[in-house]
Protein backbone atom coordinates (compact mmCIF):
# COMPACT_ATOMS: atom_id res chain seq x y z
CA UNK A 1 0.00 0.00 0.00
CA UNK A 2 1.19 3.55 -0.69
CA UNK A 3 2.15 5.68 2.30
CA UNK A 4 0.84 9.02 3.42
CA UNK A 5 3.77 11.43 3.38
CA UNK A 6 4.43 13.51 6.47
CA UNK A 7 4.78 17.25 6.95
CA UNK A 8 8.47 17.69 6.16
CA UNK A 9 8.17 16.06 2.74
CA UNK A 10 8.78 18.76 0.08
CA UNK A 11 5.96 17.41 -2.11
CA UNK A 12 3.49 18.87 0.40
CA UNK A 13 4.90 22.35 -0.26
CA UNK A 14 4.64 22.30 -4.04
CA UNK A 15 1.89 23.91 -6.07
CA UNK A 16 0.27 20.83 -7.58
CA UNK A 17 -0.27 20.64 -11.34
CA UNK A 18 -3.65 20.77 -13.05
CA UNK A 19 -4.81 17.67 -14.87
CA UNK A 20 -5.86 17.69 -18.50
CA UNK A 21 -9.37 16.32 -18.93
CA UNK A 22 -8.09 13.82 -21.53
CA UNK A 23 -5.78 12.33 -18.91
CA UNK A 24 -8.52 11.64 -16.34
CA UNK A 25 -9.39 8.34 -17.97
CA UNK A 26 -5.82 7.03 -18.12
CA UNK A 27 -4.69 4.01 -16.13
CA UNK A 28 -2.12 6.16 -14.35
CA UNK A 29 -4.75 8.50 -12.90
CA UNK A 30 -7.16 5.65 -12.15
CA UNK A 31 -4.38 3.93 -10.25
CA UNK A 32 -3.68 7.05 -8.20
CA UNK A 33 -7.38 7.32 -7.26
CA UNK A 34 -7.46 3.64 -6.26
CA UNK A 35 -4.30 4.09 -4.16
CA UNK A 36 -5.83 7.14 -2.48
CA UNK A 37 -9.05 5.28 -1.67
CA UNK A 38 -7.15 2.30 -0.26
CA UNK A 39 -4.90 4.35 1.97
CA UNK A 40 -7.71 6.65 3.12
CA UNK A 41 -9.86 3.67 3.96
CA UNK A 42 -7.05 2.26 6.12
CA UNK A 43 -7.08 5.36 8.37
CA UNK A 44 -9.75 5.20 11.06
CA UNK A 45 -10.00 8.97 11.31
CA UNK A 46 -9.40 9.81 7.64
CA UNK A 47 -12.25 11.49 5.79
CA UNK A 48 -10.49 13.13 2.82
CA UNK A 49 -7.14 13.02 1.07
CA UNK A 50 -5.29 15.12 -1.49
CA UNK A 51 -3.00 13.55 -4.11
CA UNK A 52 0.18 15.28 -2.83
CA UNK A 53 -0.34 13.38 0.44
CA UNK A 54 0.64 10.19 -1.39
CA UNK A 55 3.46 11.97 -3.21
CA UNK A 56 1.54 12.85 -6.40
CA UNK A 57 1.74 16.55 -7.12
CA UNK A 58 -1.50 16.83 -9.09
CA UNK A 59 -4.69 18.79 -8.42
CA UNK A 60 -6.91 16.03 -7.14
CA UNK A 61 -8.60 15.25 -3.85
CA UNK A 62 -11.14 12.70 -2.70
CA UNK A 63 -13.71 12.75 0.10
CA UNK A 64 -14.58 9.45 1.76
CA UNK A 65 -18.14 8.14 2.17
CA UNK A 66 -17.31 8.22 5.91
CA UNK A 67 -17.35 12.01 5.74
CA UNK A 68 -20.89 12.00 4.32
CA UNK A 69 -22.02 9.55 7.02
CA UNK A 70 -20.71 11.89 9.70
CA UNK A 71 -22.37 14.88 8.03
CA UNK A 72 -25.73 13.19 7.75
CA UNK A 73 -25.62 12.77 11.53
CA UNK A 74 -24.31 16.16 12.59
CA UNK A 75 -25.80 18.34 9.87
CA UNK A 76 -29.06 16.66 8.90
CA UNK A 77 -30.33 19.86 7.33
CA UNK A 78 -27.61 20.00 4.72
CA UNK A 79 -28.41 18.25 1.47
CA UNK A 80 -25.83 15.47 1.48
CA UNK A 81 -25.39 13.48 -1.65
CA UNK A 82 -23.09 10.82 -0.34
CA UNK A 83 -22.68 7.07 -0.29
CA UNK A 84 -19.72 7.21 -2.60
CA UNK A 85 -16.35 8.86 -2.87
CA UNK A 86 -16.43 12.42 -4.09
CA UNK A 87 -13.56 12.83 -6.58
CA UNK A 88 -12.50 16.37 -7.50
CA UNK A 89 -9.98 17.26 -10.19
CA UNK A 90 -8.73 20.83 -10.59
CA UNK A 91 -10.98 22.15 -7.81
CA UNK A 92 -11.38 25.90 -7.45
CA UNK A 93 -13.20 27.85 -4.79
CA UNK A 94 -15.62 30.11 -6.65
CA UNK A 95 -17.50 31.57 -3.67
CA UNK A 96 -16.76 31.96 0.02
CA UNK A 97 -18.93 33.27 2.79
CA UNK A 98 -17.57 36.16 4.78
CA UNK A 99 -18.82 34.39 7.88
CA UNK A 100 -16.06 32.28 9.44
CA UNK A 101 -16.16 29.37 11.82
CA UNK A 102 -13.51 28.36 14.36
CA UNK A 103 -12.74 24.67 14.03
CA UNK A 104 -10.60 21.94 15.49
CA UNK A 105 -8.54 20.43 12.72
CA UNK A 106 -5.99 17.70 12.14
CA UNK A 107 -4.34 16.19 9.07
CA UNK A 108 -3.21 12.72 8.03
CA UNK A 109 0.10 14.30 6.96
CA UNK A 110 0.64 16.12 10.26
CA UNK A 111 0.58 13.35 12.85
CA UNK A 112 -0.47 13.88 15.63
CA UNK A 113 -1.02 17.59 15.86
CA UNK A 114 -4.42 19.23 16.22
CA UNK A 115 -5.25 22.88 16.43
CA UNK A 116 -7.83 25.58 15.97
CA UNK A 117 -8.27 27.27 12.63
CA UNK A 118 -10.66 29.79 11.09
CA UNK A 119 -12.42 28.66 7.94
CA UNK A 120 -15.19 30.16 5.85
CA UNK A 121 -18.51 28.74 6.90
CA UNK A 122 -19.68 28.20 3.33
CA UNK A 123 -17.84 27.72 0.07
CA UNK A 124 -18.74 26.77 -3.47
CA UNK A 125 -16.23 24.88 -5.58
CA UNK A 126 -16.07 24.06 -9.26
CA UNK A 127 -14.19 20.90 -10.20
CA UNK A 128 -14.10 18.05 -12.71
CA UNK A 129 -15.39 14.61 -11.79
CA UNK A 130 -14.09 11.13 -12.68
CA UNK A 131 -16.08 11.20 -15.93
CA UNK A 132 -14.36 14.40 -16.99
CA UNK A 133 -17.46 16.50 -16.36
CA UNK A 134 -17.33 19.91 -14.78
CA UNK A 135 -19.54 20.43 -11.74
CA UNK A 136 -20.20 22.98 -9.02
CA UNK A 137 -20.90 22.12 -5.45
CA UNK A 138 -21.80 24.29 -2.52
CA UNK A 139 -20.94 23.18 0.99
CA UNK A 140 -21.23 24.34 4.55
CA UNK A 141 -19.90 23.06 7.85
CA UNK A 142 -17.71 19.97 7.69
CA UNK A 143 -17.78 19.65 3.90
CA UNK A 144 -16.80 23.32 3.50
CA UNK A 145 -13.94 22.71 5.93
CA UNK A 146 -12.81 19.67 3.93
CA UNK A 147 -12.90 21.57 0.63
CA UNK A 148 -10.76 24.38 2.07
CA UNK A 149 -8.30 22.00 3.77
CA UNK A 150 -7.83 19.84 0.66
CA UNK A 151 -7.47 22.76 -1.76
CA UNK A 152 -4.84 24.20 0.60
CA UNK A 153 -2.91 20.94 0.13
CA UNK A 154 -2.93 21.50 -3.65
CA UNK A 155 -1.46 24.96 -3.05
CA UNK A 156 1.35 23.68 -0.85
CA UNK A 157 -0.27 24.78 2.41
CA UNK A 158 -0.79 22.85 5.63
CA UNK A 159 -3.32 23.64 8.35
CA UNK A 160 -0.51 24.17 10.86
CA UNK A 161 0.57 27.27 8.88
CA UNK A 162 -2.50 29.07 10.22
CA UNK A 163 -3.71 27.02 13.15
CA UNK A 164 -3.15 28.01 16.75
CA UNK A 165 -3.36 26.29 20.15
CA UNK A 166 -1.66 23.27 18.60
CA UNK A 167 -1.61 20.17 20.74
CA UNK A 168 -0.39 16.63 20.24
CA UNK A 169 -2.95 13.89 20.74
CA UNK A 170 -1.63 10.38 20.17
CA UNK A 171 -4.24 7.90 18.92
CA UNK A 172 -4.06 5.86 22.14
CA UNK A 173 -5.07 9.00 24.07
CA UNK A 174 -8.12 9.60 21.92
CA UNK A 175 -10.97 8.19 23.93
CA UNK A 176 -14.29 9.78 23.46
ZN1 LIG B 1 -4.54 17.33 5.32
Image (spheres, grey):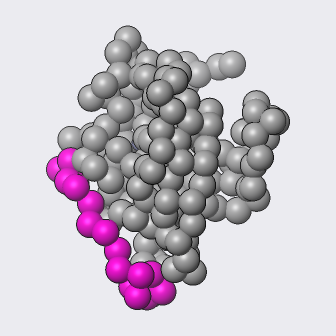
Say whether residue 76 is left or right of residue 32: right
Say whether residue 93 is left or right of residue 142: left
In percent of width and height, residue 85 lies at 64, 61
In percent of width and height, residue 48 lies at 53, 49
Find out whether residue 165 is within the magenta segment.
no
In percent of width and height, residue 91 lies at 43, 59
* Of the pair 80 and 41, the residue shown nearer to us: 80
Ligand 1 shown in quarter: top left
For residue 121, above or below residue 40 = above
For residue 18, above or below residue 95 = below
Badge count: 0
For residue 144, above or below residue 151 = above
The residue positioned 21% from the left and 47% from the top of the image is: 13
Q: Does residue 48 appear in the picture of this structure?
A: no
Q: Which residues are magenta?
A: 9-27
In percent of width and height, residue 2 lies at 41, 63
Determine which quarter of the picture holds residue 26: bottom left
Q: Does residue 75 appear in the picture of this structure?
A: yes
Q: Quadrant of the C terminus?
A: top right
The residue positioned 75% from the left and 49% from the top of the image is: 80
* Of the pair 108 and 1, the residue shown nearer to us: 108
Amino acid sequence: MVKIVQKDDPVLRKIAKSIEVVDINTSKIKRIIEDMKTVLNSCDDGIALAAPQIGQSIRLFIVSPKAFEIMSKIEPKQDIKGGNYLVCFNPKITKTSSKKMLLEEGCLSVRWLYGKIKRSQKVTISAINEDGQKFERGASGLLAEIFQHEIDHLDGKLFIDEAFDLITIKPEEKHE
